[in-house]
Image (cartoon, rainbow, N blue to C red):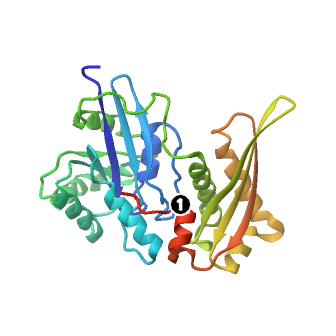
Amino acid sequence: MNNYKSGFVTLLGRPNVGKSTLINKLVGKKITITSPIAQTTRNKLKGILTNDDNQIIFIDTPGVHKPHHLLGEKLVKNAKSAINGVDLILLIFDSCQKPGKGDAYIRNLLMNNKSKFIVVLNKWDLVEKKDRYERINQYKELFNDNLVSLQEVSALSGYGCNELIKEIRTALPTGKPLYPKDMIVDQPINVILSELIREQVLLNTREEIPHSVAVKIEKIEYIKKKGKEITAILATVIVERKSQKGILIGKGGSMLKAIGQSSRMNIKNLFEGTIYLELFVKVIPNWRKKESRLIEFGYEDDF
């Protein structure tokens, strides 16, 4: 254990740069939701990678963006708070794009905080080969050539991920494992379940149902029937308008059925036996602007 390393590593970046996809790839299992829609992540979730000589606790955060409601303000505040008290930050960029004002804002946030970080250029496989040299220089210029490290990766294909893990291990302090070796996520099961269902709402409805969706797990029952393990889950999908409820249910309940089926496919990896999932849809106008509703649905300030 003398050379064992362990520590906390926050993934930080703008919305839709691939933080959640990257954390799933690094940990080796799907523990956080992903979507082509920006601002998918809402919870500050920890994914745990344990190897023979290191344990890395990755902290996934909401994308840093300009908030338009109380929920957005809380998400950005929680993302910013996640850079305090950690051993390292992975600053994730979408390398398909040149650095912009939003990227400069996050750079200044880290520089002012004097945080130790690695710059990660994600989606590197999508950058034209002829543009790669120039793109690297553009990000070097963003930091005035003063980089701790710069690593090109693809969260989808896994390109560069092993090298990134080696870079992270080098930067971490010596220390004992902080979590049991078989633990890969630190969130309560109801949080993971609600996020997996919300992911399927986003993927099945896309732009028709924006980010005014929350999922509340009402009940989880573990049943043994004729020697078989059954997990029965009751969940409510919350939206802000009646028109959104109609879209979510779909003609003859077809959309809600599709969401339930695709949700079960992911949920069954978490439990032994059969999964029963029952979904309801409820309208709560402007819930994202109400403190009491945000607390009820699990979106509290996290410091």
Taking 96 as reference, is 5 above or below it? Answer: above
Q: Position of 237 compared to 157: left or right? A: right
What residue is at 50 percent from the left and 29 percent from the top? Answer: 182
Q: Secondary structure at mark 1?
A: loop
- Which amino acid lies under the numbered mark 1 shown in the image of this protein? Gly
- Percent across and percent down for residue 292 are 54, 71
In front of the other: 66 or 99: 66
Q: Is residue 94 visible?
A: no
What residue is at 57 percent from the left and 55 percent from the top? Answer: 195
- Percent across and percent down for residue 105 are 25, 67
- Percent across and percent down for residue 237 are 67, 64
Taking 130 as reference, is 227 above or below it? Answer: above
Q: Is residue 241 visible?
A: yes
Name the image quarter holding residue 88.
top left
Judging by the rendered image, the residue that carries numbered circle 1 is 298
Farthest residue to the front: give it: 292
- Percent across and percent down for residue 210 are 57, 72
Name the image quarter holding residue 201.
bottom right
Q: Position of 134 compared to 296: left or right? A: left
